[in-house]
Amino acid sequence: MHCKNHNLNVQIQTKLVEVLTQSNTELKLINSFAKYVHECKTINDIMSTIITKFESHNGYKYCSIYLLDESKNNLILENTSSFIDKSKLKKSISITQQNNLLAFVANTGKYANINNLNRDFENNSLGYNSQIVIPLLNKENEVMGIIDFKHPEKNYFKMHHKKTLTTITSFISTKICQITHIDKITKYQNQLEDYAHIVSHDLKSPLRSINALISWIKEDNEGNLDESTLTNINRIDNVLSQMENLISSTLEHSKIDYKLSKQNDVDLNILLNEIKEVIFIPENITLKIQDKLPKIYCEKIRISQIFQNIIDNAIKYNDKEKGEINITFTETLSHYQFSIKDNGKGIDNKYHNKIFEIFQSLETIKKSSGIGLSIVKKQVNYLEGKIWVESTENIGSTFYFTIKK
């Protein structure tokens, strides 16, 4: 009896070691493929990488990938193992085709496997005896395509193969969806940019023509126009300038949500000095900047627009005999926090949120489009930060914003 129990224990332990070894092998395979898929940048990368990697693993010597075409009626062969005789493969398979395992999986969205190809579904012209087909599903569980695996041995594919291949296929499906989504966004962004440029050009052209006509009228009638007429002509000129500025600002606003340029380390000490040279600071206004501002890794144009717009507003809306603007910063573990304080007119509390909305300007000032602070907010959001204002009328305002490290 003791001998039997000992043999039974040995058998159980041996079986357990086999199961654990198999599980460890499958986990390593899953982890490897997760890494391969993550590093892919295009759908072609996914197809070629996955096929190549499957070839390097024993037991997966046959692999082919089909994707549904735009009509959702046909599976199109995208890639397949290099040593397969491709002349024997169908390049396109109708999902209505009967007696075809690939079409069956594409129609049902469920995996299927056959352990003896000589007896089931399709002609075994490639010399394989076991087959398993896994669907590529999007997040709505709609079929995007299939991955087809075959093996020379009969009854080869077991449940652990199905679980492993289904997990790997889910990685592939997710990555395909991500790349497709990014491609669509990029396409729409390019279309939007093209449209914005066309609209900008078409709107600015007549404005410039009117501006030119006004200049000719003033030149041709120099000395003959009364003060009232000259005042009205100058008003028209100012309105044209505001409209052109509004068009330019709208175009700029439309570009914020996508990448503008290469990211670099931006030294804010240097950047603020550059901004001081660009904007006009009247003699009665003093701009003070805290020493040793940080370097931030970002697109320079974004952080520059944030500072420049807030500083420009602090100058435009300062009604004091001696204006003051102070820039300081602190930091937390995750963010830099900046403040730009002025002693200007201040903002009524009920407008503290409204000023960050597009086309909202509290005063009518030449060249004020009402877009500046909405651009600032979008740039701050893009840099994963927040912006807010604390202000008291007739005393001044402090704009705070954070930027993620």
Image (cartoon, rainbow, N blue to C red):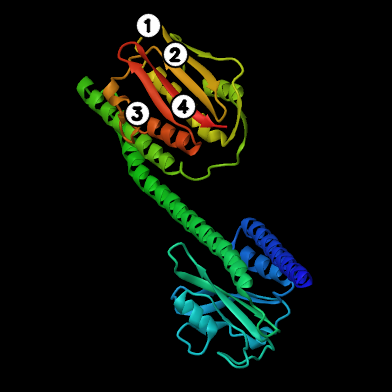
Between 396 and 231, the one lying in front of the other is 396
The numbered mark at residue 368 is: 3
Which residue bears the numbered disc 4? 401
* CA gap, disc 2 and disc 4: 25 Å
* CA gap, disc 2 and disc 1: 11 Å
Horizontal arrangement in the rendering, residue 217 relative to residue 271 (left or right)? left
The numbered mark at residue 321 is: 1
- The vertical placement of 369 against 33, above or below, is above
The tag earlier along the polypeptide, 1 or 3, is: 1
Question: Label 2 neighbourhood size at 10 Å, few (<14), some (14-19), many (20+)?
Answer: few
Residue found at x 29% / y 32%: 239
Three-letter amino acid code of the residue under disc 1: Glu
Residue found at x 32% / y 25%: 352
Q: Residue 342 sits in which quadrant?
A: top left
* CA gap, disc 3 and disc 4: 22 Å
Question: Label 1 neighbourhood size at 10 Å, few (<14), some (14-19), many (20+)?
Answer: few
Give the structural element (helix, strand or loop) at label 2: loop
The tag earlier along the polypeptide, 3 or 2, is: 2
- Give the quadrant of the N terminus: bottom right
Question: Label 3 neighbourhood size at 10 Å, few (<14), some (14-19), many (20+)?
Answer: many
Three-letter amino acid code of the residue under disc 4: Phe
The numbered mark at residue 282 is: 2
Q: Residue furthest right?
A: 3
- The vertical placement of 311 against 36, above or below, is above
Label 4 near label 2: C-beta < 8 Å? no
The tag earlier along the polypeptide, 2 or 1, is: 2
Horizontal arrangement in the rendering, residue 339 relative to residue 334 (left or right)? left
